[in-house]
Image (tube, helix red, strand yellow):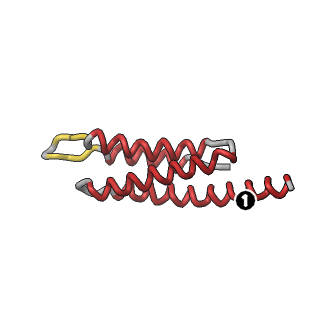
């Protein structure tokens, strides 16, 4: 069984990080930065909620690509993005575990079929 409790905490922390202080005023990050941050989170949630093991591989690949795209984008953004970097790192670890689980399940299905 998968737990998404940690994912919810990470998302709320990232929402707080989206606001940066600029001379006492709160300013949102550029829309493109917000959009790609949301892309990897949505892709990650799709993996966590995927029930069809046959589709899991495609979902894992999409989520991983979205995370690597976001990491690349964070390199070009000013400021510290430690919370989001940690969230992506944690999510990638979860994806690795799910990938192992999925491979095991697919192998079991192949063995049963033969």
Relative vertical location of residue 108 with respect to residue 13 in this rendering, above or below:
below
Lateral position of residue 58 relative to residue 113, left or right: left
Task: State which quadrant residue 24 falls in.
Answer: top left
Locate residue 29, reporting x and y percent.
Answer: 26, 43
Lateral position of residue 42 relative to residue 18, left or right: right
Secondary element under disc 1, as helix, strand or loop, is helix
Locate residue 95, reporting x and y percent.
Answer: 56, 56
Q: Residue furthest left?
A: 23
Query: Which of 11 and 110 lies nearest the eye of the viewer?
Result: 110
The residue under label 1 is: 104
Pointer 1 local density, CA inside 10 Å: few below 14, some 14–19, many at least 20: few
For image coordinates 24% across by 47% down, the residue present is 20
Query: Which of 72 and 14 lies nearest the eye of the viewer?
Result: 72
Locate residue 49, reporting x and y percent.
Answer: 61, 42
In which quadrant of the rendered image does the C terminus lie?
A: bottom right
Relative vertical location of residue 108 with respect to residue 54 in this rendering, above or below:
below
For image coordinates 47% across by 47% down, the residue present is 9
For image coordinates 46% across by 45% down, the residue present is 41
Lateral position of residue 59 relative to residue 75, left or right: right
For image coordinates 21% across by 40% down, the residue present is 26
Query: Which of 60 and 28 lies nearest the eye of the viewer?
Result: 60
Task: State which quadrant residue 103 falls in.
Answer: bottom right
């Amino acid at each position: 069984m998968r737990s998404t409790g940690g994912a919810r905490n990470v998302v709320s922390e990232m929402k707080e990080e989206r606001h940066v202080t600029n001379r006492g005023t709160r300013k949102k990050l550029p829309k493109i930065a917000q959009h790609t941050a949301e892309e990897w989170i949505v892709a990650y949630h799709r993996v966590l909620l995927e029930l069809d093991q046959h589709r899991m591989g495609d979902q894992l690949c999409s989520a991983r690509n979205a995370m690597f795209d976001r990491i690349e984008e964070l390199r070009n953004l000013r400021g510290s993005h430690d919370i989001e970097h940690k969230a992506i790192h944690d999510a990638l670890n979860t994806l690795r575990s799910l990938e192992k689980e999925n491979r095991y399940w697919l192998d079991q299905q192949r063995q049963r079929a033969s």
